[in-house]
Amino acid sequence: MQTRIVVEEVGKTYVKPTGEVVQALSGVGMTLESGTFYSFVGPSGCGKTTLLHMLHGLLSPTEGQIFFNGEKVTGPTTNKALVFQQALLLPWRNVVDNIKFGLENDRTKSEPERQTICERYIQIVGLRGFEGHYPHELSGGMQQRVNLARALAVNPEILLMDEPFGSLDAQTRQLMQEELQRMVDWKRSGKIVIFVTHDIEEAVFLADKVFVFSFRPGRIMKEIDIPFPTPRSLAIKEDPTFLKIKHEIWNLLAGEARKAMAE
């Protein structure tokens, strides 16, 4: 079955403890299709993460509606997984048990089946030999691989990623961008992947389509299709077309970033 998310004129307003009203998003509309990787890029405070949380069901829109396969999104469901910037692993659990955590409420799977799933994703994310290690024994990149494996193990139709590489050093971040394409085969599996980032280069490198957001209230300034086939190597970042798209997005965002800095 084709998976589809439809976002209809969504807005989100917050009221601060001081009583000040802040409009985070306004008039956001998009259609997201299965087998596609989407990046959301924009300045700080443009509502990217707010929209991601509404797609997951953690937040509700103040205006507009979000539909998943024709059904209104009213809360979190098991077919969606959210990966945060910080790995948020359980420190008292080793790699296997952290990955298994998301499967423990799945009554349809036996313990041997859960173990087999964990072993599969340990292999996929390249952590064979580290099964018994605890989070404090792992590097930042390895922790984020466990975090990703935990999300993938529940086989979500929708994978939502909120700056998952933002806390990594520059070299590890680039390598994780390349490895993510191997770990998450969205075209074959039909998953919808949504990746929030401030990094224009990262957005272009990973995505099939980039949504460029304005400063608050966040609106979609432009949708940009990325013409390169996947998986991509890091060398593509030197391609003239890649650089042209990167500069186009920066030109769109430069003024918006200045607004964010002036806040």
Image (cartoon, rainbow, N blue to C red):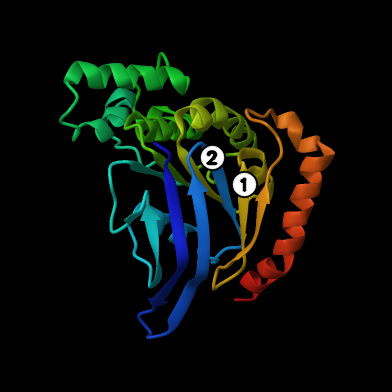
Quarter of the image for residue 7 reads bottom left
The residue beneath circle 1 is 209
For residue 74, above or below residue 9:
above
Q: Which amino acid, mark 1?
A: Lys
Looking at the picture, tell me which residue is in the foreground, 136 or 203: 203
Which residue is at the front of the view, 87 or 155?
Answer: 155
The 10 Å Cα crowd at callout 2, few under 14, some 14 to 19, many 20 or more, is some
Q: Is residue 220 left or right of residue 186?
A: right
Dividing the image into 4 quarters, which one contains the C terminus?
bottom right
Q: Is residue 132 visible?
A: no
Q: Amino acid at mark 2?
A: Thr
Rendered residue at 75%/33% (across/down): 236
Relative to 184, say whether 27 is above or below.
Answer: below
Instruction: Tell me, for residue 222, which label it has, or none.
Output: none
Can residue 113 be seen in the rendering of this structure? Answer: yes
Query: Which residue: 38% across, 79% down?
Result: 15
Residue at image point 34% right, 25% down:
95
Q: Position of residue 136 (x, y in %)?
A: 38, 32
Residue that label 2 marks = 36
Which quarter of the rendering shows the N terminus?
A: top left
